[in-house]
Image (cartoon, grey):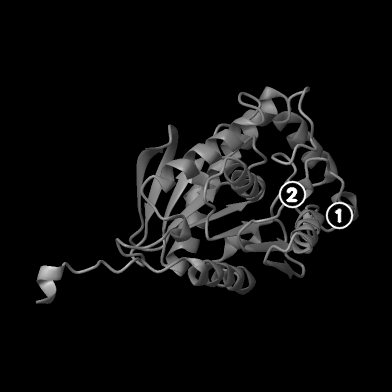
Amino acid sequence: MDQNSLTELRTFYTSFGRLPLPDGTRVTERALGGVPALDIAVPQADGDTGVLLYLHGGGYVIGDARTGVPLAAALAARAGLRAVAPDYRLAPEHPFPAAVDDGLAAYRALLADTDPARVVIAGDSAGGGLALATVLAARDAGLPLPAAVVTFSGWFDLTLSGASLTGKESVDPIFDAADIREYAATYLPAAADARNPLASSVLADLRGLPPLLLQVGSAEVLLDDSTLLAARAAEADVEVTLEVYPGSAHVFQHHHATEPTAARAMDTAAAFLARRVAPAATPQRSRSARV
């Protein structure tokens, strides 16, 4: 990807960060395991709620934490969670596995003061792939895993083996196969193997992962990334729910404020997360308080 094209794409993608937020949302800067991040506080979440770690999309090449805020805030508000969006490093300046390293560092930092049973992870497009890669890296590092994972149009196969990559080109209004190949080539350095499970989680050993919800539109070239991952997860005895939305395009959830199908998908994803976040522990009263 040439520098002019990259600059244009990054400039265009900033518009996603200007989408409306739930009323009363507060966004503040912080660091999370050495990774710059944004805390996203919504009025629907009280101070003792669970935490949503949200990873933005952009093909591992464009976007930033702020472009992920509108989806993260909408999902958090519906689920009654607070959210945090890491500003993970991008290629080509920081190729694979820099994004995975940052996702894992952010997740590890959350565990320092949060019960993993009260942490959930979500992401869209490449952020969905990064969500899975982060969980896989956490498992392989011996860390406790989050309560659940949600992905919107996740990119899970950088080997580009899915038939939909070309089979859905005629109906995908956003991407074609050449676009996806260019993002993959930019993210993966020459020495990297696209079959690495942290690049292509569809090829990973998925055993032991938390419940997954995979949402995808039928009108997108990445359709098979989610359908293949769902099949692999089921084979590995992972609780997995696959939702294919007919006629919907890539990360259609961006339009939840105006499109009923997108709003329904967001409501479903939020309910999935809320059901799986463990309730806050009830503080134990001291013996003297009981006399």
Residue 160 visible in the shown view: yes
Label 1 amino acid?
Answer: Ser
* Depth order, front residue of 179/204: 204
**Residue 220: horizontal and vertical position, in percent?**
78, 56
Residue 86 visible, this angle: no
Counting from the top left corner in percent of width and height, residue 45 is at 35, 64
Classify 10 Å Cα crowding around label 2: few (below 14), some (14-19), many (20 and above): few
Q: Is residue 17 above or below residue 259?
A: above
Identity, as a three-letter code, of the amino acid under mark 2: Asp
Q: Residue at x 65, y 56 (%)?
A: 208
| Image disc number at residue 205 | 2
Give whichever of 23, 265 is nearer the camera: 265
Q: Quadrant of residue 264?
A: bottom right
Quarter holding the N terminus is top right
Quadrant of the image for the C terminus?
Answer: bottom left
- As displayed, is residue 124 above or below residue 185? below
**Residue underneath mark 1:** 164
Q: Quadrant of residue 177?
A: top right
Helix, strand or loop under label 2: loop
Is residue 250 toward the left or the right of residue 10 in the image? right
**Residue 146 in picture, x, y percent from top left:** 52, 55
Position of residue 262 relative to residue 64, above or below, is: below
The reply to whether discs 2 and 1 touch (Cβ–Cβ < 8 Å) is no
The mark closer to the camera, 2 or 1, is 2
Disc with the residue nearer the chain's start (2 vs 1):
1
Rate crowding at label 1 as few (under 14), some (14 to 19) or many (20 or more) other CA atoms within 10 Å: some
The part of the image, by quadrant, that contains residue 91 is top right
